[in-house]
Image (spheres, coloured by chain):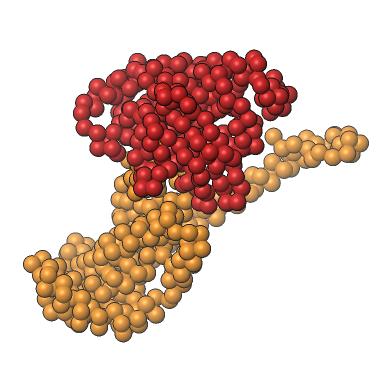
Amino acid sequence: MSERSKLEVRHLTAWFGKTAAIKDVSLSVPAHTVLAIIGPSGCGKSTFIRCLNRMHELTAGTRVEGSVLIEGEDLYARGVDPVFIRRRVGMVFQRPNVFPTMSIRENVLAGLRLNGVRGDHASILEDTLRRTALWDEVKDRLDESAVRLSGGQQQRLCIARAIAVEPEVLLMDEPASALDPIATARIEELIGELKQGYTIVIVTHNMQQAVRISDDTAFFYLGELVEHGPTKQIFTTPRVPRTEDYVTGKFG
Amino acid sequence: MPRADAGDPAEMALAAPSTLRRAGLRALGDRAFAVALTGLGLWVLVIAGVIVTVCYRLARPAFAKLGVLPFLAGSDWNPVEDSYGALPFLYGTLVTSAVAILVALPVAIGLALFLVEMAPAWVRKLVSFLVELLAAIPSVVYGLWGLFVLVPWLRETVEPALGRWLGFLPLFRGPPIGVGYLAAGLILALMILPTITAVSVEVLRTAPATQREGALALGATRWEAIRMASLPYARRGIVGATILGLGRALGETMAVTMLLGNQPEIHASLFAAGYSLPAVIANEFAEATGDIHIGALAALALVLCGTTFALNAAARLLIRVPAERRTPARASA
């Protein structure tokens, strides 16, 4: 494992009751790269990234074995508070989930408020909204309700909300699947820029998207990590026949 | 447009010429249904109107003799001298209901949050069932339990303690006699608890999980996620639940008349005996003779209706504020 790896997963197995949704997965993600997780529906993609910020255990009857290390620190070590983990590992969900009773401003600053971060909230607000390419669109209506924004804007607001607290790792669970092509393109562009500051793990069912945005790709099938490597290699010269069948569209 | 029934092609060909006419008949049926439903809806208004009109006609002699304002602001109630004032009853109704809401609301919300957010499924089912059972107990039974259990406990333990520690407040001064505003208010709290809890559980359960997860993913603790995501979402529903509970508290007759002491007086102390609007109507209507006495009781009924209506309207205004923020999202970027 390279010393520069930001995130390292070792022998991770995740259970729903007696079913293992993720089976003995190990991989590592270097800092400032984008890892795309691909695979057919139900292969455990979402479960996998929900293990990386300990969201998986919020569902009743679930269990996780193995370890996930951020800069060498195990998220699953005894005595680690998942609340603090989630402050270091941000997450963006499949559908935009802005807080409907909060204004645009309050949404961006929600995480800072929670964590009691003091400092210049106004400049953090502007900076974060600029980084998510929202500033020009919303600067005159920061105190309007966030649900008045379009779906694409809401999703960028969710990204802004996640990065306002400066997490080290950003998890994205099919962040563009509910958006139209134009909004999707903007999110993808954004991911390219965010890579400078964060390490990103993104689940996607869209293989072209994985090719466009990621450095590495991991292909999951039935809860197992089938193949993991540089995105270019996975999509041009996969080593495992099943990967080739999937990326060439023989099954999905 | 209603669509012809799908089926065997031959049958459809045969049916084709009459399709239009059949559609016309079905539209007529639809309209008849709409008219019937509107009629049923209007009945509610008619019944409410009739009740208020009858009360007003009964109350007219009293209003004529006493004057509306002196009656509303008067605090003397003496049927022997035909002197009637509504204030002690209005005061008793409002104070007991306020005690009920102040005690029941935090407990109900806490209970609802526990049931929705923390309790395992079997606990939730069991506790929900028990809480709903509370709603099925007749109010006279609540009254009896109050007289035999709650009142002695208040008189011997709770009221002396409150007087000792909080006696600097006028609310908790005076002799601990057991029956009074506090006893009636606490029983009312118990009676409205199931309503507020059950409705709050339902609205909290509909709070979208995605909002909660959004808060948790930002590093919120369980309580912070509830405060950021579940409670704002459920706020309107919980206020609605409180209105329902308040409605029951304001109108509750039997348990209150058994525990309030039935003294047409106004006291600052919660330990003192008072009287409520429904209680005096129930207690005196059978023996009331003379137009003025009956009229005064009917006028109290109007005051009760007016109070309920005013509090409902006020609560509705309260929850209208966030409605502006509920504009649906516009489509796409």
Front position in the image: B148 or B60? B148
Give chain A's shade.
red
Residue A114 falls in which quadrant of the image?
top left
| Quadrant in which the C terminus of chain A appears | top right
**For the point 42% across and 35% down, which residue is it?**
A69
Give chain B's shade.
orange
**For the point 61% across and 37% down, which residue is it?**
A223
| A103 relative position to A27: left or right | left
Give percent across and percent down for residue B258: 30, 80
Give percent across and percent down for residue B229: 38, 43
Q: Is residue B265 above or below residue B245?
A: below
| A139 relative position to B170: left or right | right
**For the point 55% across and 18% down, which residue is it?**
A230
Give percent across and percent down for residue B28: 69, 43
**Residue A5 visible, this orientation:** yes
Give percent across and percent down for residue A131: 36, 18
How many numbered callouts?
0
Front position in the image: B200 or B8? B200
